Amino acid sequence: MPRRALDNPIVLPVLGLLLEQPTHPHQMLAELRRRSDAHAAAITRGTLYNTVAALTEAGWLAPLERQRSGNRPERTVYTLTEAGRDELVRRLDSQIRTPKREFSQFLGAVAYLGALGRDGAVEALTERGRRLRQRTAEDEQQLEDALAAGVPRMHVIEAEYALSLARAEIAWVDSAAEELRSGALTWPTGAAPEPEEDA
Amino acid sequence: MPRRALDNPIVLPVLGLLLEQPTHPHQMLAELRRRSDAHAAAITRGTLYNTVAALTEAGWLAPLERQRSGNRPERTVYTLTEAGRDELVRRLDSQIRTPKREFSQFLGAVAYLGALGRDGAVEALTERGRRLRQRTAEDEQQLEDALAAGVPRMHVIEAEYALSLARAEIAWVDSAAEELRSGALTWPTGAAPEPEEDA
DNA sequence: CCCGCACTAGTCTATTTGGACTGATAGAGT
DNA sequence: ACTCTATCAGTCCAAATAGACTAGTGCGGG
């Protein structure tokens, strides 16, 4: 009986999807992956079915009907209950209201940038900038297309947010690379941070 | 025998720490938590010991000595091997070079901002802005103090990066809240996205 | 018209993880 | 001196996860 299952990161996407329409787990997975909706890409079957079970037990989801086409495995369609809708709003509100220090791989890597040596660091950062710029350009294009096609802005708002952050990252990466190149940002000692006599 | 253990997110912090100095797992944990070094906060004992074992087996770490003081549990100090140092550099380089779409809770929540209703959304975003501004001010202060105290910039570079992103987030949150308030960003239909006849 | 391949929907198990537990030592307070 | 608590350093197991596996269906190509 899933205990922590109720606060794993895929709960929100699941509730969010069901707000739009009742579906069965397999379809959720496909849909979430298609949208790459958030971290959805990281969802795996095990977690999903497990989570759906937990949410059902918590009374936030309810099985709506079981269908089967031909002799395919039976599938169960779930809806959001009243309580589920409330819970979604509660979580949404709290997650927006309260910033949490989240954590990206890149941030972790930057902390040890020193280990790459000056030239290596410049090289890698420059490359990142290049790729980031390209990806961002594509995303911008996509967003524009969607808006041009009449999709309401509210529906692409997270793309706008992601773009803002991406632009900020590009700016930082560029400036860091530049400062390293020009020598404005210098190396403390060798490759490794100097082993000071303790902190 | 840990299989996926070699590519879990704490590998980099562990290798990074050992680059500075040999240590035993318990100390790594304490140190990583103290620095809140990256997601380090998320590290738990189980994972850490497991990872250290895997890294050792992979030949990137080697037990240096086993010490014991008094009748305390014996502790094993590990060092980074030559291969481990190479691996660290390889990972660092690739993680910096290649941007990955990482994923934050907030991004996921923003996607369903609509479910909060206009006023709720404005409220929540405004509050986030407030908290973010405060936290960022503190971080700026800390960074300044560190620099004033003579810490080389290279050692606080990840803090500089985090600050840039935080400022960008603040800007976005403020502008989104403002647009909602002013009506420049409008609601498509009711609380839920309209149930179109499929995509 | 038959074969292979991809998709549909889930189930199920080996691996991983969180975090409770152990059992010692050092210092704080009384 | 004597509890009480915090820290030290791990081990260990129930719970959660990744992703292999099952098993039926439909379609494209030779």
Image (spheres, coloured by chain):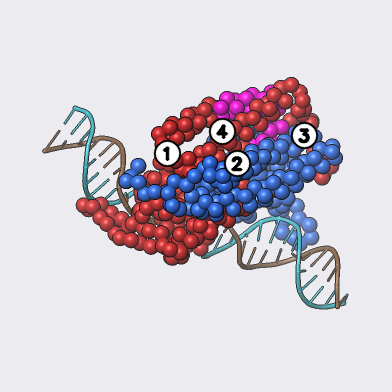
Chain colours: A blue, B red, C cyan, D brown
Chain on which label 2 sits: A
Range covered by the magenta-colored residues: B108-133
Count residues near mark 4 (Cα–Cα under 10 Å), then give few for <14, some for 14-19, many for 20+: some
Q: Which of D9 and B100 is in front in this view?
A: B100
Q: Can residue B127 be seen in this view?
A: yes
- For the point 37% across and 53% down, the residue is B21
Count residues near mark 1 (Cα–Cα under 10 Å), then give few for <14, some for 14-19, many for 20+: some
**Regarding mark 3 in the picture, which secondary structure is present there?**
helix
| Residue kind at label 3, given as amino acid type | Arg
Q: In which quarter of the image is residue B181?
A: top right
Residue B126 magenta: yes
Q: Which of marks 4 and 2 is nearer the N terminus?
A: 4
Q: Give the residue at mark 4.
A: A99
Q: Position of A21 compared to B79: left or right? A: right
Q: Where residue B10 appears, x then y in whole percent?
A: 48, 52
Q: Where residue A97 appears, x then y in whole percent?
A: 59, 29
| Residue kind at label 1, given as amino acid type | Val
Discs 3, 2: same chain? yes
**Regarding mark 2 in the picture, which secondary structure is present there?**
helix
- Rounded to the nearest whole Å, what is the CA distance between mark 2 and mark 1? 20 Å
Q: Give the residue at mark 1.
A: B151
